Amino acid sequence: WIPDPGHWCGGSLITADWVLTAAHCFDNIKKIGMLNVVIGATQLTQPGPGAQVRKIKKLFRHENYNRSDISNDIALLELNEPVQCSPYIQLACVADPTLRVSQLRNCWIAGWGVTAEGEHLQRQSYQEKDEDSSDHLQEAKVQLIDVKLCNSSGWNSGKIHTHNLCAGYPQGRIDTCQGDSGGPLMCQDNHDDSWWVVGVTSWGRGCARARRPGVYTSTQHFYDWILAQMGLSP
């Protein structure tokens, strides 16, 4: 979504009027009414006729979200009116409890974030607006990295929570970065062409550094919470 002028955070449309995103995106937002949610665009400066714009009716941040350690970093946005699905706009599927996420191999990230870590940037969370954010939607293939390895000394040294996923490459080079917060970590199902949003872009140390992969909030872990906020039952 975009506060005028510029890109702030990403998200995934999971029903016609609900967007899944990261709680930390709203740490410094005083008025959600200033935000536009842009759906169906691949270029920010020219969204095109297929794009739709909505306002946020209500923000639901996880009740146990902790700003200091970025735990439970998940949120839902209820839109002011439903989005119309089209060739440009399709609903994302949230990983349910039966999915074996660790076995998925074809995984991708997407966002409008910066494409290089600046000298000024010692990234913690990804939400800060940056003048160097991408105008075109970017995507990259990543690997899921074992959480125990990701949490080990020399990697993230105990800062990873049980409800996190890590993705990227041990050697770095490809990663989410500033401006990508709230966007999806997506993996293809092993048995068909369907795709799952398995993670929400949360935080990291620097961007694309060796042994510092991106950290994501597991949607599977919060599946029941997501349904409950939307008034649905598992």
Image (spheres, rainbow, N blue to C red):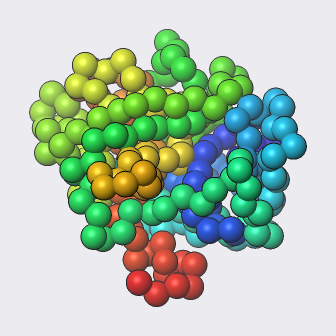
Location of residue 94 with respect to 105 vertically, above or below: below
How many numbered marks does the figure carry? 0
Q: Residue lying furthest front in this view? A: 192
Side of 205 where 63 appears, left or right:
right
- x 28%, y 41%: residue: 105
In this view of the protein, which residue sits in the foreground, 45 or 83? 83
Q: Position of residue 153 (x, y in %)?
A: 12, 33
Q: Position of residue 9 (x, y in %)?
A: 62, 43
Q: Is residue 24 visible?
A: no
Q: Residue lying furthest right in this view? A: 49
Residue 17 occupies which quadrant of the picture? bottom right
Location of residue 221 with respect to 106 vertically, above or below: below
- x 48%, y 18%: residue: 117
Q: Position of residue 72 (x, y in %)?
A: 39, 61
- x 60%, y 45%: residue: 10
In this view of the protein, which residue sits in the foreground, 63 or 49? 49
Which quadrant: the C terminus? bottom left
In this view of the protein, which residue sits in the foreground, 59 or 174? 174
In this view of the protein, which residue sits in the foreground, 77 or 17? 17
